[in-house]
Amino acid sequence: MSTLDETPGASGTQAPAKGVRVKTHPALCNGMGNCHRFAPDVYHLDEDGYIGLHLLDVPPELADQARLGAKVCPEGAITIIEY
């Protein structure tokens, strides 16, 4: 176990990575697929090409991908909830 930089506020530390919660608004989705194109590990589309989820907890290692997928949605059909 390393003790280097484990104390909050210690010099050179980074805050631990946090996950995010994704909330989608399927009624706004027009099936453009940008979310899946830029974040395929987070956003899955149904057989018709529309967002296939409503609420999802995303682990820290995929949080940046989730944010990018939401950002590129032209309809604003994805909300990222930071926690």
Image: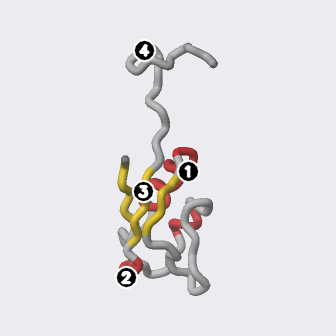
Q: Nearer the viewer, residue 67 or 34?
A: 67
At mark 1, the secondary structure is helix
Horizontal and vertical percent position of residue 78: 40, 66
Tell me which numbered mark, 1 or 2, is placed earlier along the sequence. 2
Q: Which of marks 3 and 1 is in front?
A: 3
Tell me which numbered mark, 2 or 3, is placed earlier along the sequence. 3
Q: How far apart are marks 1 and 2 (CA)?
A: 25 Å
Badge 2: few (under 14), some or many (20 or more) residues near its Cα, within 10 Å?
Answer: few
Q: Are marks 3 and 1 in contact (CB under 8 Å)?
A: no
At mark 3, the secondary structure is strand
Q: According to the image, label 2 marks what residue?
A: 27
Q: Distance between the residues labelled 4 and 3?
A: 28 Å
Q: Distance between the residues labelled 4 and 2?
A: 46 Å
Q: According to the image, label 1 marks what residue?
A: 62
Q: According to the image, label 4 marks what residue?
A: 10
Q: How far apart are marks 2 and 3 (CA)?
A: 19 Å
Tell me which numbered mark, 4 or 3, is placed earlier along the sequence. 4
Residue extending farthest to the front is: 1
Q: Residue 43 occupies which quadrant of the picture? A: bottom right
